[in-house]
Image: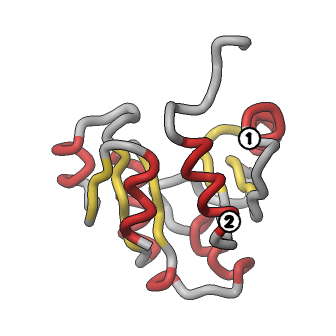
């Protein structure tokens, strides 16, 4: 869809994360082939590893299995990871995985819902994430 694009400010955030050499991964409940295609089409200017979508061998979010697999692939610990999301499912996933849950209020759900689902911080624009690193 030619109307699909990242939210305003996402490019600036990703540019700065790249400059700071912050490892970034993607976890989606959308089918993995679609997730990879979406990243390739919309986010190819930045590097993400790993990229995981829905797989038959992994329970979907909010089960923490996918997030924990990503953490292991990065050689990190959950306490050292930040999870940015815009739904209650994302916040529940972060909490279940032991990650720091950050709710994006510019996405699909209001801040109150994100906080009720476990968000430890809320940000109103993408670059607000940089203050939490």
Q: Earlier in the sequence, mark 1 or mark 2?
A: 2
Q: What residue lies at 27% left-to-right and 54% top-to-bottom?
A: 122
Relative side of 129 to 47, left or right: left
Where does the image place residue 104, in percent across and percent down from the top left?
37, 46
Where does the image place residue 71, in percent across and percent down from the top left?
63, 77
Crowdedness near tag 1: few (<14), some (14–19) or many (≥20) residues, C-alpha within 10 Å: some
Q: Secondary structure at mark 1?
A: loop
Relative side of 133 to 111, left or right: right
The residue labelled by disc 1 is: 43
The residue lying toward the viewer, choosing from 8 and 92, is 8
Crowdedness near tag 2: few (<14), some (14–19) or many (≥20) residues, C-alpha within 10 Å: few
Q: What residue lies at 68% left-to-right and 65% top-to-bottom?
A: 19
The residue lying toward the viewer, choosing from 123 and 116, is 123
Q: Quadrant of residue 17?
A: bottom right
The residue labelled by disc 2 is: 19
Q: What residue lies at 74% left-to-right and 58% top-to-bottom?
A: 48
Cβ atoms at labels 1 and 2 below 8 Å apart: no
Relative side of 116 to 74, left or right: left
Residue at the limit of the structure toward the top, as seen here: 2
Relative side of 66 to 93, left or right: right
The residue lying toward the viewer, choosing from 106 and 61, is 106
Q: Where is 43 relative to 100, above or below?
A: above
Q: Secondary structure at mark 2?
A: helix
| Quadrant that contains the C terminus | bottom left
Where does the image place residue 85, in percent across and percent down from the top left?
44, 50
Q: What residue lies at 16% left-to-right and 44% top-to-bottom?
A: 112
Q: Quadrant of residue 94?
A: bottom left
């Amino acid at each position: 869809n030619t109307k699909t694009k990242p939210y305003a400010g996402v490019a600036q955030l990703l540019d700065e994360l790249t400059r700071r050499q912050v490892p970034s991964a993607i976890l989606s409940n959308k089918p993995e082939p679609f997730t990879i295609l979406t990243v390739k089409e919309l986010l190819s200017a930045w590097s993400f590893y790993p990229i995981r979508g829905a797989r038959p061998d992994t329970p979907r979010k909010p089960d923490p299995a996918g997030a924990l697999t990503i953490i292991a692939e990065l050689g990190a610990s959950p306490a050292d990871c930040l999870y940015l999301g815009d739904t209650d499912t994302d916040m529940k996933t972060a909490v279940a995985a032991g990650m720091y849950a950050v709710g994006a209020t510019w996405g699909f759900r209001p801040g109150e819902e994100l906080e009720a689902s476990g968000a430890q911080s809320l940000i109103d624009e993408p670059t607000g994430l940089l203050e939490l690193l």
